[in-house]
Structures are given as structure tokens and as C-alpha cells.
Image (tube, rainbow, N blue to C red):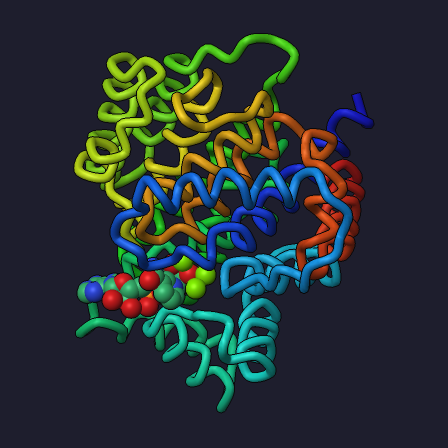
Amino acid sequence: DPMLLKNKFRGTMLGVLVGDCLGSPYEGLTTISRHRKVLLQRRLNKLWNTKFREPVMVYTDDSAMTRSLAESLIEKQDLDIVDVAKRFAKSYHEEPDRGYGAGTATVLKEWKRHVEETNIKIPAKNLFDGLGSYGNGGAMRIAPVALFSYNNYDKLLYYVKEATEITHAHKLGINGAILQAIAIQQSLCLNASEELNVTNFVDDLINKMDKIENASEFKERLNIVKNLLSEDGDEPNEQRVVEQLGVKVRALESVPTAIFCFLKAQKRIKRIRTDDPLRRAIQYAISLGGDTDTIASMTGAIAGAFYGYEKFSVLLLSHCEEWERFREMADKLLDIATSI
Ligand code: 8NA
Ligand code: MG
Ligand code: MG
Ligand code: MG
């Protein structure tokens, strides 16, 4: 159904934006106190239900890099990593204060001086004493690549790796982006009007990661996701999730967490008062603390791909910087993805 797919593409791109905008004020807080959770509940009630009258919520590096990647795919009608790098560098140069990770910023400054096909991956390889970055910066921006190649799995894997390696050379950074992309792809292909089998969702991810080189750490985390889902009932259990899955800027300690937030929010969660599972997923992700903008953004992308754009309130969307631009990018990505 083309309308359904359009709704899901929009949901993915707007999920990135909404999670980032809502999560960024809490980024880096190690614990979200009971009091702050009550305030978060009230803030989201207000944002979901009232007409735009506050200053717009600005997005951070997560959405900025997602935007550049989407615009490159749209303009070039294919993945052109030199063009992506140029757009990343330009966007960073214009707005360096969007909250970029230090390693990524180093690469972006390097590219500002010159970018060529032959040297494109070298700055990323040199980061962190030659280990490369294992940050979640590859995963946080990968949604447009997942949309672009949603109907060609081999292409998806190859493009995700290519788009990630230009800044994240460490296997955990790359495999984190792969996991995030395949979670989005799985969500796109599911029907939200049927109950989601959360165990099957994780098992499918585990089976796919099994075929990826050096992905044992992610498979272990996915097994923890499964255990937590089966044990926790409607308790929020933020502490155990933080301890067992993590909420850090490392891909390994944030991508499985985002997948968990999406799956846990299929059911009611105590003290998160909403009937909307898309909002529940994002609110829950923020309530874990840590890298809140990025985890909420990745959760939003997966949940948005599942539920679709219509589950977001337009009132909420109208509070987010450039939301109409993100919706337009989704439509253009759909045109390309279904025409090639
Ligand atoms: P990155 O590549 O700089 O990685 C993030 C951080 O992880 C680095 O700055 C290092 O501290 C650490 N790191 C990564 N790889 C290694 C390694 N091999 N050895 C030692 N340390 C390493 O940037 P990124 O683009 O991956 O980062 C994305 C995150 O940074 C997102 O959360 C984004 O929003 C941003 N950010 C996060 C915070 C926060 O407090 N959580 C604050 C500002 C910005
Ligand atoms: Mg950010
Ligand atoms: Mg930030
Ligand atoms: Mg972040």
C-alpha cells in the first residue's frame, strides 16, 4: 500500500527529529529523578496537545547529520560518500554548536580543508589512536540510508557500512549503524494494526547480526533485550536497563537500548501516562537518562517506521525545527526508493 509506506517513511524521518528535539535538554544527565520524570510527563502532555506558542525546539547533530545524508541521497539519487562528506562538513562549518561528538568534529574539520575520493576514509581511521570511533554517531544518522535501500537488503548493508565508515571506523560503530538500520527496515515491513511479536522482532535481528562479521557483542546485547522484555512486565526498571544495556554515547551501549525502548513501549509502562505507544517509546527512552537525544532519536526512528507519521500529533511536530523539511525529505526518499 503506497499510502501506508508514505506514512511510514515520514514516521521514520520525523521520529529522528522528534526524539532528538525532545531528548536533547536531558542529554548527559546520569539519572532522571522522579521529580524530573513528572515534569517530563507534563511537558510532553503540553507539547502533544497545545498549539505552537513556545520557541521552537532546536535539533542537534543527530538530525543535522541525518538531514545532510538524506539531502545527498535525494540530490545524487544514490549514495555518494564524497558528496555526503562535503555536506557534513558544510553543515558543521555553518553551525558547529549543534552538539557534535569530539571525534566526529575532528573528521569534519579535516574535511573542511579538503575532501577527495582517495582520502575520504583516512581521518576516521586515525581517530582514537588508530582504533576509529565506536560512538553512536553512525547509527544516529542512518535512517535515510535504511529508507533509501529498504527493499534491497544486500544494498542496505553495503550502503550503511559505506556511509558510516567515513566517520566511524571501529567495528562497533559500524555494526551499531547496521543494527539500527535493520531495525528500521524490519519496522517498515510490519503492519502496526497487528500486535507486534516482540520476541520474533529480536530473534530476526539476532539472526541477521549472526551473518555480520564480528557482531557477537551486539548479539549478546540483543539477548539481554529479550530477557528484559520477558521479565519486566509494566515496571519501568530504568536502573536495570541502564546497568544491563547502557545509555552511553557508544553504539554498543545505545543502539540495543533504543530497540528495547521501542519494544517495551508496545505495552503500558507504569508512571508513563499516555495511550500513544509512539510517545511512550520516546518518553521512556528519555527517562533512562544518559545520551537522551540520540537514544530517543533512534527509538523514534524505529517506532516511527512502525507506527507511521499519523501517530505524531501535528501540534507536537509544529514545535520542532524544520519539521516540514524532514517530512518532505521522507517523501522524496520514498519516490527514489520505489523508482529504482
Ligand atoms: P565520537 O566519534 O566523538 O564518539 C563519541 C565519544 O565516544 C568520543 O568523543 C569518545 O569520548 C568516545 N569514543 C569513541 N570511540 C572511542 C575509542 N575508540 N576509544 C575511546 N573513546 C572513544 O562522536 P559520535 O558522532 O559518535 O557521537 C555521537 C554522540 O555525541 C551523540 O550522543 C551526539 O548527540 C553527541 N553528543 C553527546 C553528548 C552526551 O553527553 N551524551 C554530548 C554532546 C554531544
Ligand atoms: Mg545530539
Ligand atoms: Mg548533542
Ligand atoms: Mg546525543
Q: Residue at x 76, y 25 (%)?
A: 4
Picture quadrant of residue 310: top right
Q: Quadrant of ligand 1?
A: bottom left
Residue 63, x across and y down, in percent: 57, 58
Taking depth in this image into account, of 26 and 78 the one nearest to the observer is: 26
Answer above or below: position of 217 versus 31. above
Residue 106 versus residue 56 in the image, above or below: below
Is residue 232 something one can see in this rendering? yes
- Image point 50% across, 38% down: which residue? 41
235 sits left or right of 323 in the view: left
Q: Whole-percent x and y of residue 99?
A: 44, 70
Q: Residue 314 is drawn in which quadrant? A: top right
Position of the N terminus, as image quadrant, is top right
Left or right of residue 323, residue 160 in this image: left
The picture places residue 40, in percent across and down from the top left corner, at 47, 44
Q: Is residue 171 visible?
A: no
